[in-house]
Amino acid sequence: MPSIYLFVLLARSCRALVLRILTGLIVELPPEVLRARVCNLPVTAQIPLIGNVLVLLGMSTLVFAHAGWGGPVAFWLTLALVVR
């Protein structure tokens, strides 16, 4: 059975990924302000935010998959360019 540290590492990496995506998409706020707002939320409020973004990414991948094998590739490449 995996230890709790593995789950903590997975949760922190998911939060870091979601923060990178949000700071790339929301350009009205500086990245430091957006990170501070999300990190200052209680954990019980962060869980739905991060979970919903991950579900949205999965559903968007499925929608783009209807265009063929290049759809998800184009979606993730575009997202990677926006995040940078």
Image: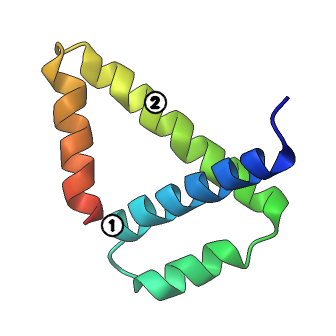
Q: Give the residue type at disc 1.
A: Gly
Where does the N terminus fall, quadrant-wise? top right
Q: Nearer the viewer, residue 73 or 62?
A: 73
Q: In this view, does 16 lie to the left or right of 45?
A: left
Tell me: residue 27, above or below residue 9. below
Left or right: 51 as drawn, with respect to 82? right
In this picture, residue 25 sits left or right of residue 38: left
The CA distance from mark 2 to mark 1 is 18 Å
**Amino acid, disc 2:** Gly
Counting other residues with Cα less than 10 Å from the Cα at mark 1, is it few (<14), some (14-19), or many (20 or more)? Answer: some
Residue of label 2: 58
Q: Quadrant of residue 73?
A: top left
- Mark 2 residue element: helix
Which residue corresponds to the image point at 18% horizontal and 16% vertical from the top-left? 69
Return the x and y of residue 24 as percentages of the image width and height.
Answer: 33, 67
Give the mark nearer the N terminus: 2 vs 1: 1
Note whether 64 is above or below 18 in the view shown.
above
Q: Identify which residue is drawn at 71% across, 48% down.
A: 48
The percent coordinates of residue 52 (x first, y second) are 60, 43
Residue picked out by circle 1 = 24
